[in-house]
Image (cartoon, rainbow, N blue to C red):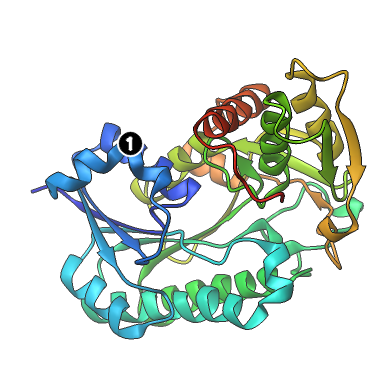
Amino acid sequence: MAKKALITGITGMVGSHLTDFLLKKTNWTIYGLVRWQDDLNNIRHLINVINKNNRIILFYGDLTDSLSIEKLIKNTLPDYVFHLAAQSYPHTSFDSPLNTYDVNILGTERILYFLKKYSKKAVIHICSSSEVFGRVDRSQLPIKEDCNFHPASPYAISKVGTDLIARYYAEAYGLTVISTRMFTHTGPRRGDVFAESSFAKQIAMIEKNIIPPEVYVGNLKSLRTWADVRDAVRAYYMLVTINPIKGEIYNIGGSYSCTIGDMLNLLISYSNKSKKIKIKVDKKRFRPIDADAQIPDTRKFQKHTGWKSKISFEKSMKDLLNYWRAEVDKNKYFLTR
C-alpha cells in the first residue's frame, strides 16, 4: 500500500517543488493543505493530476482554525508530514506580528497536537528557519546548530517558537519530529517579496519596457549562503527517509556565499539591458533589524544523510530570472515590490 505524505503549504515555492519531487521519486499519495483563497499558480502545471484525485489530493483549511486542522489530520492519517506552511516573510512580520505568531507558533502546535491524537507514528518534518539565529557575530561563523538564538524580527521569534514546540513534542510525547533550520534557498516560483526574486522581477519588467531601468533595493551588504529550492526539497525527502531520529535538529544550506549586492550584480549581468540599469536605494525595503550574516555549518546533516547541494548559484539565479521573464510575458501588471 502506498505511503501517504501531507504537505502544508503545498502552493508555496518549496511545497510545489517538493510535490514535483515526490511525484517523480515515490508512489506516495500526496495530501496538500491549502487555504480557499490561495493562489494556485505554483501548482498550475499539476492541475490535471489534482483533478484525477488520486496522487494529489487537496484539503482546504487554515493553520489558525483548529477544527480544519483536526479534520485534515483525522482524514489523511499521514505517514510523512512536511510542515512548510507559514507566514514566511520577515518584513511583513513587523507589520503583522500577531498574525505571524498565530500562524507559525500556534499553527505548529495545532498540527502536532492532532498528529499526536490521530497519527502518532508519522515521521514529521517541522520547518524552522535560520532566522532564529538572527544577529550572529562574525566570530561564530559558520553557524552551528547549538548557536544561541538572537531573533531579529517577529517572524524569527515565531520560528523560535516553532523550533521549541517541535522539540517538546518529540521529547514529551515520543513523536518522530525532526526540525530543520534551512538557510536562504531560492529558484523558480520564489515569491516577489524576497530580495532576489524582487530584483529578478524588476529586471524582467525592465527588459519588456514596462518600468524604467531602475532596480529598487534595500540592504545590499547582508551576507547569505545560497541553496537552490530543488536541492532543498531533496534534502527534506532524505530527512524523513534516512534513519529519522526524533527530536533532531539540522542546519541545511548551500555551499556558495555572497552579499545581496553581489547577487544583484550577477542578475543584472544576465540582462540584455545591464548597461542601462541603475540601482536605487529604497529605505522602505530595510528591516528595523537585519540578520546580516547567515552562513551555515551543515556538516551534521551531510554526515547523517550524505546530502550535498548539486545546483549552482549561477543556475539558480538564471532559472529565477527566466521564471520571471515567463511570468512577465503572461502578465505585465505586477505590484512594484
Q: Residue tagged by mark 1? A: 45
Left or right placement of residue 83 versus residue 23 in this view: right
Q: Is residue 132 visible?
A: no
- Please say if 1 is above or below 276: below
Q: Is residue 52 visible?
A: yes
Other-residue count near label 1 (Cα within 10 Å), few / some / many at <14 / 14–19 / ≥20: few
Residue 72: x and y in percent read: 25, 71
Residue 179: x and y in percent read: 51, 61
Determine the image quadrant of residue 113: bottom left
- Please say if 128 is above or below 197: below
Residue 281: x and y in percent read: 91, 47
| Front-most of residues 75 and 307 | 75
| Front-most of residues 187 and 227 | 187
* Residue at 61% in and 69% down: 159
* Residue at 56% in and 67% down: 87
| Front-most of residues 36 and 331 | 331
Q: Secondary structure at mark 1?
A: helix
* Residue at 34% in and 66% down: 36
Residue 5: x and y in percent read: 27, 54
